[in-house]
Image (spheres, coloured by chain):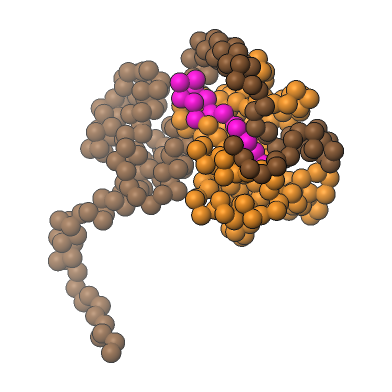
Chain colours: A brown, B orange
């Protein structure tokens, strides 16, 4: 319970028009406990009816939007996460479509073996595939997102690839050397 | 996301982040906010500020997560005094906050559903300004209406 005298809708209405109020406020509930109980019951009924009415297309669209927004959050943080590798996200995408890998490969005009190799991290995706994925999702997930998933995984692989690094180091001649400054 | 400078029409980059414990004392002292935001601590409280002015809070919003009803309830929202009414300095503050709530509701698997309890006289305005529809005593926004709001206020890329 607040100790501060807060403004009521009536107070605010003296200074602002209704239009201006909705651009500045959402007020706390003023319902009594009994009124809220009734309102909540009525709301729940309507809410669950609405959920039942949702079409597969509406659900898929929302799930794709969710996938995109979560990718965006991932790009905004620096840590690599295996669940956001290209292959993991592609598996998730195929799962949302409820399609078999064979049908999905046909959608993208790639061989199912190639798709399987990409899904199992045996082969890297190319730009052509990223463009096709963008178009397949009706631009919901842009090619640049798929590219960034792939490049972040590559970056992680480079960081951890001590074996190949050591082999390649051995092939280098006349490596630059610098005196340590005093 | 971008806010609009009312006079020049210039876009200004803004940020929304969760209110930290240390912010509450500053909010309490800030005469540009009229509500007691300390009482909202039990909920998720977000602030919006300009990227170039991190210490000046322009708006606040508290959200209640109701997973069993697949929704986020917008419990309280307040834009700071200089940005209200005819002479407001910056526009789109409330729109950005509501769109941010809709984005959270998509990420949490609620299909973008955000509810609020309106004052009766404001129902039409919440509907026309943001795309809410009536759910009994509450208003709700979801699905494509939420996506439209997100695209309008937060940008898509």
Residue at x-position 66% and y-position 44%? A4
Q: Is residue B100 above or below residue B138?
A: below
Indicate the quadrant containing the N terminus of chain A: top left, top right, bottom left or bottom right: top right
Residue drawn at x 15%, y 56% is A163
Residue located 43% across and 46% down the image: A75
- Rendered view: A173 above or below B141: below
Question: Can you see residue B135?
Answer: no
Residue B138's quadrant in the figure?
Answer: top right
Q: How many marks?
A: 0
Q: Residue furthest front?
A: A3
Residue B75 is left or right of residue B11, and the answer is left
Magenta segment boundaries in residue numbering: B65-78
Can you say which quadrant of the picture contains the C terminus of chain A? bottom left
B116 vs A121, left or right, is: right
**Residue B115, image x, y percentages:** 60, 26
Task: Give A164 or B141, whichever is nearer the viewer.
Answer: B141
Please say whether residue B119 is visible from this viewpoint: yes
From the viewer's perspective, tell me whether residue B48 is left or right of residue A83: right
In the rendering, at what x and y percent does residue B157 appear? 55, 42
Residue B55 in the image: x percent, y percent?
Answer: 60, 59
């Amino acid at each position: 319970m607040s100790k501060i005298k807060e403004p009521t809708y009536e107070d605010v209405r003296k200074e602002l028009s209704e239009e201006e109020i909705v651009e500045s406020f959402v007020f706390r509930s003023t319902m009594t406990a009994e009124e809220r109980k009734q309102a909540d019951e009525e709301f729940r009924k309507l809410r669950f009816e609405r959920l039942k009415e949702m079409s597969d297309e509406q659900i898929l669209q929302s799930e794709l939007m969710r996938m995109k927004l979560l990718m965006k959050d991932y790009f905004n943080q620096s840590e690599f996460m295996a669940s956001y590798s290209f292959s993991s996200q592609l598996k998730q995408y195929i799962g949302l479509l409820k399609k078999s890998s064979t049908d999905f490969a046909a959608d993208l005009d790639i061989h199912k073996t190639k798709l399987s190799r990409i899904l199992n991290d045996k082969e890297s995706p190319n730009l052509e595939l990223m463009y096709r994925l963008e178009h397949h999702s009706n631009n919901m997930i842009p090619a640049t997102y798929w590219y960034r998933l792939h490049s972040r995984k590559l970056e992680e692989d480079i960081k951890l690839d001590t074996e190949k690094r050591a082999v390649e180091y051995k092939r280098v001649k006349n490596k630059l050397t610098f005196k340590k400054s005093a | 996301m971008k806010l609009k400078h009312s006079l020049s029409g210039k876009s200004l980059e803004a940020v929304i982040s969760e209110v930290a414990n240390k912010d509450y004392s500053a909010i309490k002292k800030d005469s540009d906010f009229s509500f007691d935001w300390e009482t909202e601590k039990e909920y998720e409280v977000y602030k919006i500020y300009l990227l170039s002015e991190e210490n000046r809070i322009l708006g606040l919003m508290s959200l209640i997560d109701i997973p069993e009803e697949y929704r986020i309830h917008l419990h309280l929202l307040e834009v700071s005094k200089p940005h209200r009414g005819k002479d407001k300095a910056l526009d789109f503050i409330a729109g950005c906050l509501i769109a941010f709530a809709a984005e959270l509701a998509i990420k949490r698997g609620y299909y973008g559903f955000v509810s609020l309890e309106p004052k009766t006289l404001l129902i039409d305005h919440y509907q026309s300004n943001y795309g809410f529809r009536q759910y009994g005593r509450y208003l709700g926004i979801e699905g494509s209406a939420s996506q439209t709001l997100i695209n309008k206020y937060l940008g898509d890329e």
